[in-house]
Amino acid sequence: MALFKKRPAGKPGEWYYCLEHGTVEEGPQCRAADRFGPYATREEASHAMERAREREEEWRRDPRWNDGERGPGGEG
């Protein structure tokens, strides 16, 4: 039995998007590996997945990171 329970890192007033539950949370609720953030507002956290998709698309199209391999669906 563990003497000390490891708590998720974070502070109240910081907002996170939980990948496991698909919800916005304030402060430390889920473990860090399962969330995006911190965000300054609940609104920013609620758009975390949209922003992640946008960034992934930007990186996928960036010639500095594109090594010529085809992406999903034969794109590349």
Image (cartoon, rainbow, N blue to C red):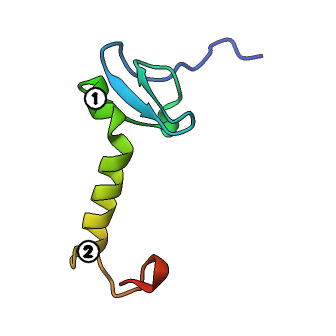
Callout 2: 10 Å neighbours few (<14), some, many (20+)? few
Looking at the image, the residue that sits furthest to the right is 1
Q: Which residue is mark 2?
A: 61
Horizontally, residue 17 falls left or right of residue 6, namely: left
Horizontally, residue 56 falls left or right of residue 3, namely: left
Residue 71 image position (x, y, % from top left): 42, 79
Q: Which residue lies at the image location 29% right of the left edge and 57% below the top edge?
A: 54
Q: Which residue is mark 1?
A: 43
Q: Which residue lies at the image location 30% right of the left edge and 65% below the top edge?
A: 57
Is 30 rendered above or below residue 35? above
Distance from the alpha carbon under mark 2 to that under mark 1: 27 Å
Q: Secondary structure at mark 1?
A: helix
Give the mark toward the camera: 2 or 1. Answer: 1
- Closest to the observer, 5 or 8: 8
Residue 12 image position (x, y, % from top left): 35, 12
Label 2 or label 1, whichever comes before in sequence order: 1
Residue 8 image position (x, y, % from top left): 50, 23
Residue 58 image position (x, y, % from top left): 25, 65
